[in-house]
């Protein structure tokens, strides 16, 4: 934590959460694990939800949001052009966990799950029978939906409430072996806050209860979190106990282990701790950009306000990751542990759009951080080739000395894989949350990135712009995506269109009528 608040001060306030000591040990364990293989590195994957590379000072952002990442980078591999496959949690995380694109795994909706034939093809199953203890946890219920699909491949599965200050879910307690169906039914009944239709009375009672609890927690924690605390679908979180829990677990898990930890900050609401709140009340102004497709009508002044709170929350996250890294280093855990820091998608505060509830695929939404800290690494290595979240699964298998399954669409990340400096591999991103899951992709946003160029295609929308269906940018010359060159660079646009449409056509073949 930062020097302006010490552990004694913080723990004095944490006494209002008696759940912490008890729930850290209440993990649902399945099986006794495997024998340790000292030649295999531990693998610790940490995701901070909705962390955009465009707001990270390690990558040149105008505010000093990540001083700890900049310090840690001296001993890390830093990926500068890393992409999520999607602009929101479900498809982006599913791609990381399956090594496949959304049009393959088909987890394309909020609270979506992967297609049944893909459920057997996941990160944890790929590490089965490998000697690795496999642990998974997520603050984010969208990710828990996915993890529950892979439940039988995870030895230590931790429910969201284990690190929650409070929650209002009931059905999963009654039906723990049918989690997804139980939670979905509860949401449809309106027992937790959701936009789906359901029982008006239950919904009103639920919202009143959550509102009361939220007010109680805000009141109890006001001195530490003046802007409130993280909340998602009736779960309330703070980051610091989660970091403490990770420290506790890495000392207990039977080695070697694969641990996947998905934490909600800096996802909205942007609620930094008191020693970070207000630090970016400065004169720095982001570049103004024209409103384009899918504007939500936010003023630039409002977007700048949200961005400032988001940047301060990133600074809070950076401090906590720095605290975790220092603990791992001080206790010798880094000597035999690969630490991977990344996210599922980014955030947007421009073009009249806030956050990531949008069909848009601009860089702040899909260009994401990736850092890897490997055992014994003492120098920094920067990778500028285009890479994708589908590359993480095969890379982790490579680091563990395991075979890469044929169904994986990603490739081993440099510098571990064979690299020649060739940046010609096309990468893809998409958003199709309104398209039926098991149907051809007729409505959605799709992007292909190849070399310096990025082409975006909007399919099935009534867009009042000429030409309405495409935008293209030279990211090397125009990283802020200000000048659409789709019409002026016709040869390159045609090449990228062919690549994108061939890929979509191939993906849709199994769903064609």
Image (cartoon, grey):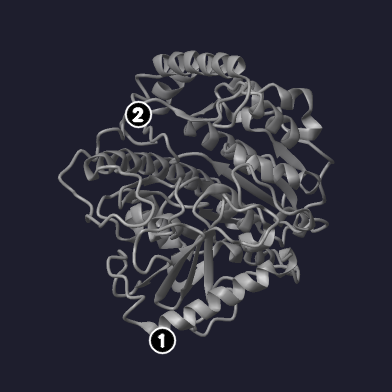
Q: Quadrant of the C terminus?
A: bottom right
- Sequence order check: which comes first, mark 1 or mark 2? 2
Note whether 170 is above or below 125 in the view shown: above
Q: Which quadrant would the N terminus be assigned to in this image?
A: top left
Left or right relative to 27: residue 379: left
**Of helix, strand and loop, which one carries label 2?**
loop
Q: Is residue 383 left or right of residue 149?
A: left
Viewer-proximal residue among 420 and 471: 471
Please report contact status of discs 1 and 2: CB closer than 8 Å, yes or no. no
Query: How many numbered marks, from 0 up?
Result: 2
- Taking the view exactly as shown, the residue that stands out farthest to the left is 283
Residue 423 place in picture, x, y as percent: 48, 80
Front residue of this view, candidates 208 and 323: 208
Look at the image and tell me whether residue 332 can be seen: no
Query: Hey, which quadrant is residue 79 in on the image?
Result: bottom left
Q: Is residue 162 visible?
A: yes
Q: Residue 156: where, in percent of width, then height? A: 74, 40
**Mark 2 packing: few (<14 Cα in 10 Å), some, or many (20+)?**
few
Specify whether 150 is left or right of 80: right
Rendered residue at 39%/60% (across/down): 363
Residue placed at 74% from the left, 24% from the top? 173
446 vs 490: above or below: above
Q: Secondary structure at mark 1?
A: helix
Give the residue pinned by disc 2. Answer: 5
Q: Nearer the viewer, residue 507 or 45?
A: 507
Query: Nearer the viewer's eye, disc 1 or disc 2?
Result: 1
Q: Is residue 217 above or below residue 238?
A: above
Mark sitting on residue 48: none
Residue at mark 1: 491
The picture places residue 469, in percent across and down from the top left corner, at 43, 66
Viewer-closest of 109 and 118: 109
Give the residue drawn at x 31%, y 38%. 309
């Amino acid at each position: 934590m930062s020097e302006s608040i010490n552990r004694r001060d913080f723990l004095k306030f944490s006494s209002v959460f008696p759940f912490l000591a008890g729930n850290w040990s209440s993990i649902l364990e399945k099986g006794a694990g495997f024998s340790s293989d000292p030649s295999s590195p531990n693998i610790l994957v940490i995701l901070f939800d909705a962390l955009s590379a465009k707001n990270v000072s390690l990558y040149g952002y105008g505010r000093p949001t990540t001083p700890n990442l900049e310090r840690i980078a001296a001993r890390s591999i830093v990926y500068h052009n890393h992409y999520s496959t999607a602009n929101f949690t479900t498809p982006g995380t599913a791609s990381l966990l399956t090594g496949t694109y959304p049009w393959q795994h088909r987890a394309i909706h909020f609270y979506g799950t992967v297609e049944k034939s893909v459920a057997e093809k996941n990160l944890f199953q790929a590490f089965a029978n490998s000697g690795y203890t496999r642990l998974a946890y997520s603050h984010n219920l969208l990710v828990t939906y996915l993890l529950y699909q892979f439940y039988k491949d995870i030895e230590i599965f931790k429910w969201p409430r284990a690190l929650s200050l409070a929650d209002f879910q009931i059905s999963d307690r009654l039906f723990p072996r049918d989690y997804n169906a139980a939670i979905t039914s509860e949401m449809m009944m309106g027992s937790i806050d959701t936009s789906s239709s359901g029982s008006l009375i239950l919904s009103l009672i639920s919202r009143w209860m959550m509102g009361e609890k939220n007010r109680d927690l805000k009141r109890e924690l006001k001195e530490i979190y003046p802007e409130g605390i993280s909340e998602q679908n009736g779960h309330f979180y703070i980051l610091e106990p989660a970091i403490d829990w990770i420290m506790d677990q890495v000392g207990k898990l039977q080695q070697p282990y694969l641990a996947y930890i998905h934490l909600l900050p800096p996802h909205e609401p942007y609620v930094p701790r008191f020693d970070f709140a207000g630090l970016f009340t400065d004169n720095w102004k982001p570049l103004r950009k024209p409103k384009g497709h899918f504007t939500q009508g936010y003023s630039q002044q409002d977007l700048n306000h949200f961005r400032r709170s988001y940047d301060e929350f990133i600074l809070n996250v950076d401090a906590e990751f720095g605290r975790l890294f220092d603990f791992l280093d001080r206790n010798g855990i880094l000597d035999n542990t690969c630490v991977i820091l990344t996210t599922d998608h980014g955030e947007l505060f421009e073009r009249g759009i806030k956050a990531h509830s949008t069909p848009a695929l601009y860089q702040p939404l899909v260009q994401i951080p990736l850092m890897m800290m490997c055992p014994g690494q003492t120098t920094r290595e920067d990778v500028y080739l285009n890479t994708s979240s589908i590359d993480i699964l095969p890379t982790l298998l490579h680091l563990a000395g395991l075979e890469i399954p044929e169904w994986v669409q990603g490739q081993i990340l440099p510098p571990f894989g064979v690299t020649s400096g060739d940046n010609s591999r096309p990468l893809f991103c998409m958003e199709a949350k309104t398209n039926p899951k098991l149907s051809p992709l007729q409505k959605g946003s799709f992007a292909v990135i190849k070399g310096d160029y990025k082409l975006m295609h909007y399919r099935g929308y009534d867009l009042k712009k000429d030409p309405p269906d495409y935008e293209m940018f030279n990211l090397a010359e125009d990283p802020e995506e200000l000048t659409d060159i789709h019409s002026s660079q016709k040869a390159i646009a045609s090449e990228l269109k062919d690549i994108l449409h061939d890929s979509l056509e191939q993906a849709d073949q199994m769903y064609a009528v």
